[in-house]
Amino acid sequence: GGGGGGWGGPAMRRKAEQERVNMQNMNVPSRLARIYNAAVTHLRHHLPMVAYALGDADGDAALVQLVHVEAERRAVDIMRDFMEERRLGETVRRAGGVAGRIEERYTSSSSSSGDGEGLFGGLDETNLAGVMGLGQANTDIASKRALAQRDDCGFAS
């Protein structure tokens, strides 16, 4: 027999492995764009032939569906790997907890008006400006700006 010893031979396997390594080193948007472009290229090449040969049997629609399913599967795998790599599930869970605490503080401060406990735990505009490092000289400016913003948003001043 021939010298390759399998499908594609060693050169094809090396090229495929190098392509896989290159794909892993790309960022997610580039990888997704590459999948999309490969699908479009495949369809542009094969669709006219399939439509001509199997048009009566809806072969062209089947090819589009097959390419769509394969591209979607690969894109989902990339996004799943990205989410696991960045631990986005954990981040979303923590962010949900923070959002819940903010909402609780906001709703409790709006329902208990007049107790001096605002959204920032008792900091009025003057104290908030100090905490933010605006200093005493800018306190009046910060207070007026905060008051104007509250009026623009429709909140009672």
Image: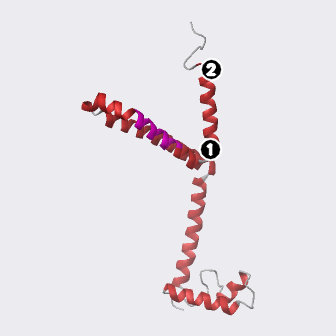
Q: Is residue 81 visible?
A: yes
From the viewer's perspective, tell me whether residue 62 is left or right of residue 32: left
Q: Is residue 157 above or below residue 95?
A: below
Q: Going 66% across and 91% down the picture, which residue do you hit?
A: 141
Q: Going 32% across and 37% down the picture, which residue do you hit?
A: 61
Q: Which mark is residue 16?
A: none
Residue 14 place in picture, x, y as percent: 63, 26
Q: Is residue 115 visible?
A: no
Count of numbered labels shown in the rendering: 2
Q: Along the polypeptide, which appears first: circle 2 or circle 1? A: 2
Mark 1 residue element: loop
Q: Which mark is residue 26?
A: 1
Q: Disc 1 residue type?
A: Met
Magenta region includes residue 111: no
Span of residues in magenta: 34-45
Q: State the CA–CA distance, disc 2 to disc 1.
A: 25 Å
Q: Quadrant of the N terminus?
A: top right
Residue 33 place in picture, x, y as percent: 52, 46
Q: Which mark is residue 10?
A: 2
